[in-house]
């Protein structure tokens, strides 16, 4: 007699549902773009980085959204920070230095979008 | 005689060293403001009595000597170094360094191919648990702007010339993560003890603006 394999949708199939924001949505090596938005107030994403494209270098432990918290809003929802790197020559058109030089920075999940691989 | 409790006379280069420290003037506007604010915060139970003094003690206990100890250990203990690069905060905690501000730590290793430089373009984020208070220039706009715009020219002003083939990596601290540069161990230090190595490691080397050099300091 063959062993009964769990079938998706059947009561035997265990599906673990992660909390919102618990699972990272970007991963190391992925190409991302920093969103180009200019909301009022003090935001942690430097202006020089908005709209720039980079690569995710590593995931950072989930954290609450500091920017929301700064306005007194703390829903307790955590999302990931992503340590991304961006070539200096992509940030500054007249960058004086080696083409390999890069900027490394942590950007909160709500400020990133995936970009198609060029 | 400046002190009646002193019955012997000795030569002091600084005769004021034994003078009693006294406050003879009325507290100024900001002294009163500070005291009033502290009292109100305690009254409203936002702070506990003694909390501010304790935090000052915490900050005073953090100096670049802690970072230097971590760097010297990493140079002499390859397993420690591997753990440090994988988990900066946890590995520093092994040495008793607490992260009172609940920041994380990433240790950035300089090699003959990569040179790391740390900045906070937004304000003055700095690995205070390990290095204490940042130097004044670290908080000023010229450093903060130039570190990301023209890091090589900035480093050159510190006397640090990075060869073209070496990649410069600038870490801009904007989250709850802090960065410590693990500088390259200088040549000619093979016989040094961990303490002798730690004495070579400067604050600026751990920010990434200068290398660690043997001839910068003398070993006693």
Image (tube, coloured by chain):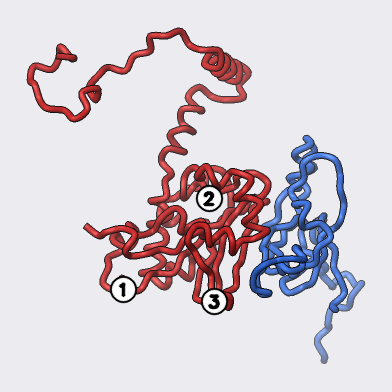
- Chain letter of the residue beneath label 2 in the structure image: B
Q: Which residue is mark 2?
A: B127
Callouts 1 and 3 close, C-beta under 8 Å: no
Image quadrant where residue B86 sits: bottom right
The image position of residue B115, as x and y in percent, is 54, 68
Query: Image quadrant for the C terminus of chain B?
Result: bottom left
Image quadrant where residue B146 sits: bottom right
Which chain did the renderer colour red?
A: B
Label 1 – label 2 distance at C-alpha: 29 Å
Nearest the eye: B84 or A91: A91
A2 sits left or right of A85 in the view: right
Q: Secondary structure at mark 1?
A: loop
Nearest the eye: B117 or B53: B117
**Numbered mark located on residue A1 in the image:** none
- At label 2, counting other C-alpha atoms closer than 10 Å, the crowd grade (few under 14, some 14-19, many 20 or more) is many
- Chain letter of the residue beneath label 3 in the structure image: B
Q: Which residue is mark 3?
A: B113
B4 sits left or right of B212 in the view: left
**Is label 1 on the same chain as label 2?**
yes
The image position of residue B167, as x and y in percent, is 60, 73
**Residue B86 visible:** no
The residue at 74%/48% (across/down) is A44
Q: Which residue is mark 1?
A: B188
Nearest the eye: B1 or A78: B1
The image position of residue B63, as x and y in percent, is 42, 46
Give the mark nearer the N terminus: 1 vs 3.
3
């Amino acid at each position: 007699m063959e062993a009964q394999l769990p079938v998706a949708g059947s009561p035997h199939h265990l599906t673990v549902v992660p909390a919102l924001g618990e699972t990272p949505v970007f991963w190391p090596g992925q190409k991302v773009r920093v969103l180009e938005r200019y909301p009022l107030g003090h935001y942690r994403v430097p202006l020089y980085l908005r709209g720039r494209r980079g690569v995710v270098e590593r995931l950072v432990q989930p954290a609450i959204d500091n920017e929301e918290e700064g306005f007194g809003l703390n829903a307790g929802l955590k999302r990931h920070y992503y340590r991304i790197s961006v070539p200096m020559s992509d940030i500054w058109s007249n960058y004086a230095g080696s083409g390999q030089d890069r900027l490394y920075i942590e950007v909160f999940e709500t400020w990133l979008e995936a970009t198609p691989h060029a | 005689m400046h002190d009646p409790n002193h019955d012997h006379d000795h030569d002091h280069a600084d005769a004021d060293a034994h003078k009693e420290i006294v406050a003879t003037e009325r507290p100024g506007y900001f002294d009163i403001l500070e005291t009033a604010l502290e009292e109100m915060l305690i009254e409203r139970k936002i702070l506990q009595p003694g909390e501010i003094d304790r935090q000052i003690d915490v900050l005073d206990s953090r100096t670049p000597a802690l970072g230097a100890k971590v760097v010297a250990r990493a140079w002499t203990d390859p397993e420690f170094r591997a753990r440090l690069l994988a988990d900066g905060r946890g590995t520093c905690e092994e040495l008793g360094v607490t992260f009172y501000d609940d920041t994380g730590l990433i240790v950035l290793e300089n090699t003959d191919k990569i040179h790391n430089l740390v900045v906070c373009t937004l304000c003055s984020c700095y690995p205070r648990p390990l290095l204490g208070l940042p130097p004044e220039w670290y908080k000023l706009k010229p450093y903060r702007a130039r570190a990301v715009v023209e890091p090589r020219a900035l480093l050159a002003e510190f006397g640090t010339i990075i060869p073209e083939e070496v990649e410069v990596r600038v870490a801009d601290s904007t989250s709850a993560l802090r960065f410590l540069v693990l500088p390259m161990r200088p040549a000619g230090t093979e016989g040094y003890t961990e303490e002798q190595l730690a004495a070579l490691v400067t604050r600026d080397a751990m920010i990434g603006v200068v290398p660690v050099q043997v001839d910068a300091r003398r070993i006693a």
